Image (cartoon, coloured by chain):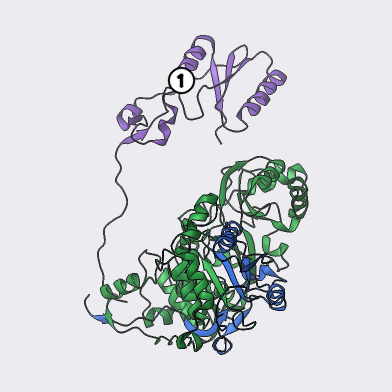
Chain colours: A blue, B green, C purple
Amino acid sequence: MAGKITVLDPRGQPSGVFGRRSSGDNPGTILSPRVRPVDSREAMEKLQMADRLDTLEGKLIYLVDVGFPGSKEFLEEVAEWFKENMPTVKVVYRQKRFDPYSDDPQLWEEIHAAGGDGVIIGVGG
Amino acid sequence: MESEYRIPTVPVVTARFEHYVQNDSRNHGMFLRYVFPPHPVGFIPKEKLRGYVDGLNPVSGKPLMPEMVEALTKPLTEEEKNPVIEKRPKHPRLLPPDTEENLHRLFLENGWTDGLPIVLPTEERVAEMLTGTDRDPQEVVGRMSVTTHQERLEYTVEKVAVIAVMAGCRPEHLPVLLAIASTEIPAFPSSTTSFSSMIMVNGPIRHEIGMNCGLAALSPFNYANAVIGRAWTLMSINFGDARPGDTFMHSLGHPINYNNLCHAENEEDSAFEPYHVEKGFKPEESTVTLFRGWNYNGINLGPAKAMAEALKRQSSMGRAGTFLMDPLVSAHLKDEGFKTKEELRQYIANEAETFPQMINFIVVGGQTNPMWVLTDYTPSITVSIDKWIPKTGIKKDEKPLRMPQPVLCKDGICGI
Amino acid sequence: MSKNLITVLDPRGQPSGIFGKVLDLSNPMAILDPEKQPTTTLESMTGQKMADRLDTLEGKTVYLVETGFAGAADFMKEVQGWFQRNMPSVKTVLRSKRGNMFTDDPELWQEIKENGDAAIVGVGG
């Protein structure tokens, strides 16, 4: 049977709807597509990266532990590196609340209010 | 942090996930400045971690910490300041005409299958499949993604019929597939831990479409169980956009992903009320319940105390899970004094020091052995199938399949 | 979908005249390996005969052999109790088969031949 036939494309179509971080209040929502927060292409197009710093010397840098295994230990080594190599950088270690998949606006607000200059967040893996 | 608080940020992710997070980042309109230490950072000695911090980023080949400093201090490029989210085009309904051989090759090479042979979804076959429901073929059923953050793909009744054809289903199976698709839950969400899922059907549709709830219900003998289970997997690939290495990161993968333990509950031989009735549905309503977890831990024998002990030992989901029990077990448990699933649930929860609502029971099997299996599956959702069934009832084929009837126990033999 | 008649091959295996046999006690795990599992042939099996029945069990010695399946030992104790209550002249001897439920125990069969008149073996299930 060498004749040509036509079949339907099995793939779903792009919807312009994207997933979003779960709210910290209900981290379990990540397990249910029906209640998981979503984002739209339009809203995401407005996102902007922050301007970079001229230097880290004398700045306040937050080391944010997301909760994956090894994150705490890795960030401790990062803090140690700053102490040895850039001692004027002030580092503050903080753990993100809830699980690695949830947002933690309270912490972002705190970093902002405390005058944090930069953030190193991790370790995803 | 970047957009709302205007604080420069370095996301640190292990190198194994470079491709994954870069894709995710593009999806979100920002080319974030990731820095990648070697993988993994968990469960390794401190000296090794120190080596990672003092060493190189295996992706860029540059010293890791100076790269972190640079990520916070090097001015943004124009591309970084004005990111564009790539808009994915809609696919045409039909693929370009080709020979059967080439089309089979195309489906395999594009990763649209589970690796097993499929039935090609021609217009004629899909039209025949659509006779299994009254719903408008262009009605949107839902959107799905195997990841949490990427774009969800949308699918219609017709797309579900396409998947049904590919999986080898017949029109009478379509209502169950539409009910599953309507949940928007993929069979295998992308987690490095390799999730698996389970499908369980209750109500009259079990027998109308020839599902097996009796002997060997979970083994590869029954047509309906096999193709319905497979179809959820094909949906998850094509609607959930599962692409290994891009959107799908199971480390070992899971063999249950082929068929998702698809079965029906043995309501007739159970000493307890059916699962869906317990969840508030009417006995005459047909439902499908989806479960998620990792492990199927057989074989176990013994009374409720042994069940509680097994749950207490289970580590993956804590003390939560679903017991699959042969009808013989349900009868023995009733003899032990548990009149309802609820009484049994309370007892096991007390013994195992957990919450009753974290324990579920399904009765399935052919009564050749009083065994039960503890899974670490927890129910995601139970949905009604009835609204997807045609008003005239399940489509009966002119020449129905003479599949073996579910092998259930004859009255009296098993003492139930 | 073509309606033309086509011919396909039968997928089923063919009868071989080879059957499985009870396992030798020296290697009970052979049940897991078809290459080592003892086999027998249709020809040798056709020569087998059932033993003549007894006129009565009264005053006879009946061996109750439990095979090792769950519940078998308890069940045989109940059978023994029944004989004691209902046919007290029957002498019953409770024995467990050596090895596991899948292995042969020729020594026990020899002992029963020497000392017994009949056997009840079970419970398979």
Q: Quadrant of the N terminus of chain A?
A: bottom left
Residue C30 is situated, as x and y percent measured from the top left of the image, at 40, 31
Residue B101 visible in the displayed image: yes
Q: Is residue B17 left or right of residue A76?
A: left
Residue C92 image position (x, y, % from top left): 62, 16
* Residue that appears at 57% across and 83% down: A50
The residue lying toward the viewer, choosing from B248 and B58, is B58
Q: In the image, what residue occupies the spot 35% across and 74% down?
A: B120
Looking at this view, is C51 or A101 the one in front? A101
Q: Position of residue B396 (x, y in %)?
A: 50, 73
Residue B169: tell me if it is visible: no
Q: Nearer the viewer, residue B303 or B188?
A: B188
Q: Quadrant of residue A71?
A: bottom right
Using the image, name the chain to which the residue with label 1 belongs. Answer: C
Is residue B101 or residue C89 the one in the foreground? Answer: B101
Q: In the shown orientation, is residue B331 left or right of residue B115? A: right
At a point 64% along the width and 78% down the height, the residue shown is: A37
